[in-house]
Amino acid sequence: MRFRCKVVDVSCLNHFTRVVNTITKLTKSCTLRLAANNLYFILTDKVANGGVSMWCELCQANFFDEYQMEGVSAEQNDIFLELVPENLSRALKTAQNAKAVKIKLTNKHCPCITVAVELPSLSSTSRIVTHDIPVSVIPRRLWNDFKEPTVPDFDVSIYLPAIKMMKNVVERMKNLSNFIVIEANRNGEINLKIETDLVSVSTHFKDLGNPPWVSDESSQNSTQERDQDTMSEARVDIKKLLQFLAGQQVNPNKAVCNIVHKRMVHFILLHDDVSLQYFIPAVA
C-alpha cells in the first residue's frame, strides 16, 4: 500500500482544511478511505443503536496538485485507515501560509499519515515542519462495515434555511430541552419545536422549496401520495443536531434535509467538490 499527495494551491489547501475542521467537530475518530479518484471520511455508528453516521466525499483532483496511491490490490484499489481527525486538523493549522504541503502514508514504529509543511523562509533553504499522525490500517475483511449508508425512502425532502440562522435558533432552544422536533412538509415549510411539561416553543420557516428528486418509482409514489401540507417529523437529540450545525465550515451551495417520519433525519450538504451526508436517528 502506498499513498502520497501534494497541495501547492493556497485556496485548495484552505478548502481542505475547512473540510477537515468540520469533520473534527462532528466526530472524535473516523475512517479515512483513500481511493483513486476520491477521499472519504466515514463515521458508521450504528443508527439503530442511537448513533449518528456520516459520509463525506471529496473529489481528490479538486484539492491536490499531485495524488498517487496503490491500494491493497489491483482489484481492490483502496486503503482504509482509522484516524483522529483533530490530529490532522492540528497539523494543517501550521500550514496557513505554506508554500506546499505533502501528505503521505509512512511507517514509523506504527503506520502514520505524515504531513510535511514547507514554510516560506528568508534564506534559500526552506523550513519544513513534519507531523506524524498515528493511524490504524483497517483489514480487508472489515471493509464492508464502511459502505455508503443507504438512504431509506423519505417522507419529505426540503431545502434548509441558512445554517447559521438555524444554529442560533437551536442554540437558544437547547437550554429548554434535550430533544427537538424537526417537522417539514412538501410545501417548503419547516418547523423546529420544543415541547416539555413547562414550555412549548416553535420556530417556523417557510418558502424554502423542495428538491425535485428523481428517484426510483417507489419512493416517488410514496411522496406523491402525501398531501403537500402534511407534516412529517422526527424527534432528535438536540446536542447531535447542534454539533452538526455548529461544525459547518464547508459553506455548501445547497443544504437539504430529508425526514423519514419518526425514524430519522438525513442532512446533505453539497459543495462543488465536497458532499457531506449526516444521519441522526429519531428518538421515541
Image (spheres, rainbow, N blue to C red):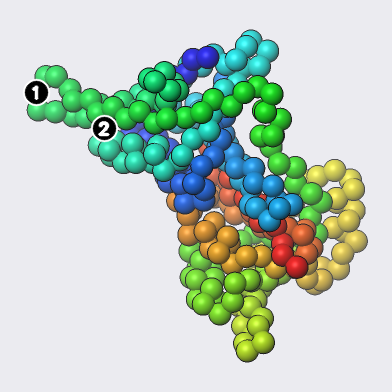
Q: Quadrant of residue 150?
A: top right
Q: Residue at x 48, y 64 (%)?
A: 164
Q: Is residue 66 left or right of residue 142?
A: left
Q: Residues within 10 Å of mark 2 (few under 14, many from 20)?
A: many
Q: Which residue extends farthest left?
A: 123
Q: Which residue extends farthest front?
A: 109
Please state which amino acid type lies under the numbered disc 1.
Ser
Q: Residue at x 64, y 42 (%)?
A: 44
Q: Position of residue 6 (x, y in %)?
A: 38, 23
Residue nearest the viewer, comparing 282 with 160: 282
Q: Which residue extends farthest top?
A: 74
Q: Is residue 65 above or below residue 87?
A: above
Q: Is residue 242 left or right of residue 216?
A: left
Mark toward the start of the polypeptide (1 vs 2)? 2
Q: Position of residue 66 (x, y in %)?
A: 42, 19
Identify the disc placed on residue 28: none
Q: Residues within 10 Å of mark 1 (few under 14, many from 20)?
A: few
Q: Is residue 167 above or below residue 78?
A: below
| Mark 1 residue element | loop
| Quarter in which the C terminus is drawn | bottom right
Please state which amino acid type lies under the numbered disc 2.
Ala
Q: Quadrant of residue 117?
A: top left
Q: Residue at x 37, y 25 (%)?
A: 114
Q: Position of residue 53 (x, y in %)?
A: 64, 47
Whether residues under marks 1 and 2 lie with C-beta atoms below 8 angstroms apart, the answer is no
Kindly identify which residue carries mark 2. 98
Q: Is residue 227 left or right of residue 243?
A: right
Kindly identify which residue carries mark 1. 123
| Mark 2 residue element | loop
